[in-house]
Image: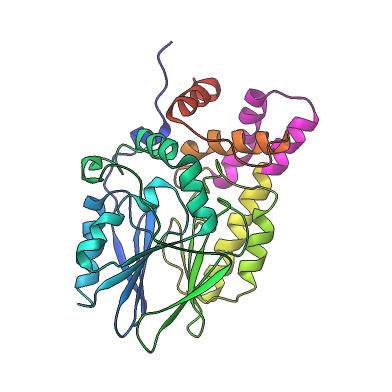
Amino acid sequence: MTAKKFASHADLEEKKVSFTRLSENAYAYTAEGDPNTGIFIGDEAVMVVDTQATPAMAQDVIRRIREVTPLPIKYVLLSHYHAVRVLGASAYFKEGAEQIIASRDTYDLIVERGEQDKASEIGRFPRLFRNVESVPPGLTWPTMTFDGTMSVWLGEKLEVKIAQVGRGHTKGDTIAYLEDQKICFAGDLVEYQSTAYAGDCYFRDWPTTLDRLAGFGFEKLVPGRGAALENAADVRKAIASTRAFISDVYTLVNNGVAQGKTLNAIYKETVAALRPTYGHWVIFDHCMPFDVTRAYDEATGYVHPRIWTAERDIEMWNELEG
């Protein structure tokens, strides 16, 4: 039998990029469901949140930043460890980057599974990694880590607060926000009209983490994928819809496990049940095999996500979609 290609291999169409001004200090780089990048601009320096998949792709972010400020990009923040978020980091060193910041949990995940994740994601996303030769050898390593919370001042006037609010998409998820302006970059904790990738998640924790995030009362928010959200109602909607999706996936899978069904049967039933509500979301067909497999693992006693390797990706995909 010929191996069936990942759903993302058919996603070759160029995406329209938007560079949205949220305030004089915050911009969002989004591209119709591709991974987003956030930008904070202070009076002396710039911080970039998530770097794009390759240095070549990061160049377009830098070009747009240079249209609005000449200030050095001193800080790069990694919202979590996934390759599509971090492997573009080297592009920012030429723009003045002095520190790559990540939570200690994210650093530990890079140590534990960074190499495997890099190989896995490059295999899954040919369009995002088509300039993979521009990625330097090795991994992207944080130069500064934190536990819980920290602040970065981009000059004397602008404080960026950075925090872990709980486990969700990964155990290292980090948000960055301007408290006074109520603007947040949430990474993949929140998606908007885009399917949450949950292959490395904590299904039982994620809804509570989102409740905690909602409690901040942010009025503007950049999700991991999807358009920048420019009012409080859309922020609430995005958080609620992400929460509903995660809860729906886990409830269906957990019920299937309780009934003694196989992973394959649970997968088919879960996709069929969720497609009417979520099937139009970006990368639904790509994410669901990974999401259901992780939910099955968590429901059967794997508290922590198992490592995805390029080989495991293919085995799983062939079992569920072959």
Q: Residue at x 45, y 57 (%)?
A: 224
Q: Magenta segment: does it hold 267? A: yes
At which x and y percent is residue 297? Answer: 66, 34
Residue that appears at 74% across and 31% down? 256
Residue 247 on image: x %, y %: 68, 49
Q: Give the range drawn in magenta.
A: 250-278
User: Outermost residue toward the top?
Assistant: 1
Out of 264 and 74, give the one closest to the viewer.
Answer: 74
In this picture, is 232 found above or below 298?
Answer: below
What's the colour scheme?
A: rainbow
Looking at this view, is 16 or 29 the one in front?
29
Q: In this rendering, is residue 278 above or below 212? A: above
Q: Where is residue 34 in the image (x, y as percent from the top left)?
A: 37, 51
Q: Is residue 41 magenta?
A: no
Question: Is 16 left or right of 235, judged from the image as shown?
Answer: left
Nearer the observer, 272 or 250? 250
**Left or right, 268 with reference to 52:** right
Direction from residue 163 to residue 244 in the image, left or right: right
Q: Is the magenta stretch mostly helix, strand or loop?
A: helix
Number of marks in picture? 0
Q: Can residue 310 be seen in this view?
A: yes
What percent of the width, then of the height, locates residue 173?
A: 53, 57
Q: Does residue 281 appear in the picture of this structure?
A: no
Residue extending farthest to the right is: 259
Give the quarter of the figure containing the N terminus. top left
**Depicted 282 relative to depicted 156: above or below:** above
